[in-house]
Structure formats: structure tokens, C-alpha cells
Amino acid sequence: MSFRYRYDPSLPAAIIFMVLYAISSGFHLLHIIRFLKLKLYFFLPFLAGVLCEAIGFCGRTISAVESPDYTNFPYVTQDMLLLIGPTCYVASLYMAFGQLIQVLDAEQYSPIKPKWLTKGLLVGDLLAMILQAVGGQKATDSKYPARRREGENILAAGFAVQILFLILFMAISGIFQHRAAKGLPLRSCNPAINWRKYLLVNHIANMLILVRSIYRLIEYGQGYNGELRSKEAYFYTFDALLMLVVSVIFNIFHPLTYVNEAENRTDSQIPLAYTNGVP
């Protein structure tokens, strides 16, 4: 242990999650390459987030090997990337939802116009990311308790912002789903656009990210000496595992796969960037 970790990081756990995230990111990359000709880019932030997780666990693996004589670079790498990765997930979820509304010709069912909805949510996500990055940089300077505490407070604010926008997003998507279920335009009746299953996958992913954000908010609210920082099991249970599940969910229900099927099953092509259903 040192001023960086309050426990000895597990080498087997770090290696396992590094490999799993690397495999998951590989599948995401293959999907994007496979459908590159369709010019869909909204899922690139998600891929970046999974890569952040994989590289972050690489840094954590190095730290575990170095124990107890930790060097700064691997520690800072894992700390920063594991903080920011899921925020990249969220950006893709926001963009995909706004585009789904447009492809269904269902703007009237959204409480906010899609163009403003997506922009507003992305601004919130960017603000959360900036706060997390700034706070994370300060919090890693653990030699100085006052500076570390300042960073933890900024991090807590970043996660509070993220939680606020996630809850807002879930409320908006819930209202949209309720209204849309009562009568979508004929265009949405295309069986290739199974918007209900898409929203279900989206809701599950959002809930898991929300749980992780609440865990992180409490963790940094408690500070360096808090209970949640004292045991590695909390981190793997409420962060690493949940974010891996989100990544795997979209490996299985990847929007690009089902959008491609939608285009192949229709006479007239539906713009890929607006189609995110799951069959």
C-alpha cells in the first residue's frame, strides 16, 4: 500500500478485466469497420470509452506488478481513464436516442425537440467529463491532502452533474416511450426498426451507468479515507463489472448490426445514423 492505493491491487483481477475489455473493444471496432461504408459515427465515443477501460486496466496491471513500490504514470493512467471511459459511453447513448426519434418521424412525442435534446445532453456530458478530468488530475496528487480533497470535491461535482443528466435522459426517454406507444407514424411500423427493444437495451445501459455514477459520487464524497476507497471489491462490483456488462450488451445488441439488417429489409434505405433498433 502507499498514498496512491489503500489496498494492494489484485493482479489477476486487473489482467482479467484488461483482457475482457480489450476483447469487447475489438468486437466494437470490427462492427464499425464492417459498416464503415455506411458512414455512421455516433458509436465512436462508445468505442473510445471501452478502449479507455482496457488501457486503464493495463495501467492497473502494471501497478499491481509494482506493488508496493508504485510509480506515478501507471497509477495516473488507470485512475484517469477508468474515470472518463463511461462518460464516453453516455455520449453515444445520447446521440443514438436523438437520432432514433428522427428516423421514427416521432418528434411530436418527445418533450424536447431532438436537435436541442441531443445538444443539451451532450453539453451536460461534456461538463461532467471536464469536471471529472480536472478533479481526477488534482485527486491523484495524493502527497498533498488539501489538493487531493479539492480534487475529490470537483470529482463529486462531476458525477453529480452526470447523475442529473442521466436521470433527465431517462425521464425524457420514458415519456417518449409512453407517448409513442399510443400511436407512431406509419414509417415506424417497419419491422426492421424495433424501437421498443432498442429502448429496453438503452434503459438497462443507463441504469447500470447511473448505479456506477452514484457509487463514484459517494466514493469521492467520503474522501480518500472513506469506506469505499478502502476495499478493491467495491470498485470491481460497482464500476468495473457494471461497465463491462454495458459494453458486452452492445457487443450483442450492436446498433450497426441491426441497422444494416433494417436497410437490407427495406425497399428504400433508411439513413443509418437515424436507425438504432434491435430485432
Image (tube, rainbow, N blue to C red):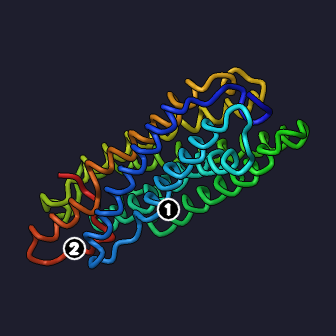
Could one spot residue 271 in this view of the protein? yes
Residue 11 left/right relative to 216 = left
Helix, strand or loop under label 2: loop
**Mark 1: amino acid:** Leu
Q: Position of residue 261 (x, y in %)?
A: 15, 64
Q: Quadrant of residue 203?
A: top left
Q: Quadrant of residue 4?
A: top right
Using a 10 Å C-alpha cutoff, classify the residue at mark 2 as few (fewer than 14 neighbours), some (14 to 19) or many (20 or more): some
| Residue at screen point 49% across, 32% down | 13
Please count the marks in the image: 2
Could one spot residue 178 in this view of the protein? no
Residue 21 left/right relative to 214 = left
Helix, strand or loop under label 1: helix
Residue 227 left/right relative to 163 = right
Q: Which-is-in-front pick, marks 1 and 2?
A: 2
The vertical placement of 13 against 60, above or below, is above
| Residue at screen point 39% across, 43% down | 20
Measured in 3D between alpha carbons, the distance from the residue under mark 1 to the one under mark 2, in whole angstroms, is 22 Å
**Mark 2: amino acid:** Ile
Mark 1 and mark 2 lie on one chain; the one further toward the N terminus is 1
The vertical placement of 257 against 225, above or below, is below
Q: Position of residue 95 (x, y in %)?
A: 44, 62
Quarter of the rendering occupied by the N terminus: top right
Q: Position of residue 105 (x, y in %)?
A: 28, 67
Check whether the beta carbons of the residues at disc 1 and disc 2 lie within 8 A of each other. Answer: no
* Residue assigned mark 2: 270
| Residue at screen point 51% across, 49% down | 53
| Residue at screen point 72% across, 44% down | 155
* Residue assigned mark 1: 117
Camera-nearest residue between 33 and 110: 33
Camera-nearest residue between 57 and 189: 57
Q: Position of residue 40 (x, y in %)?
A: 34, 72
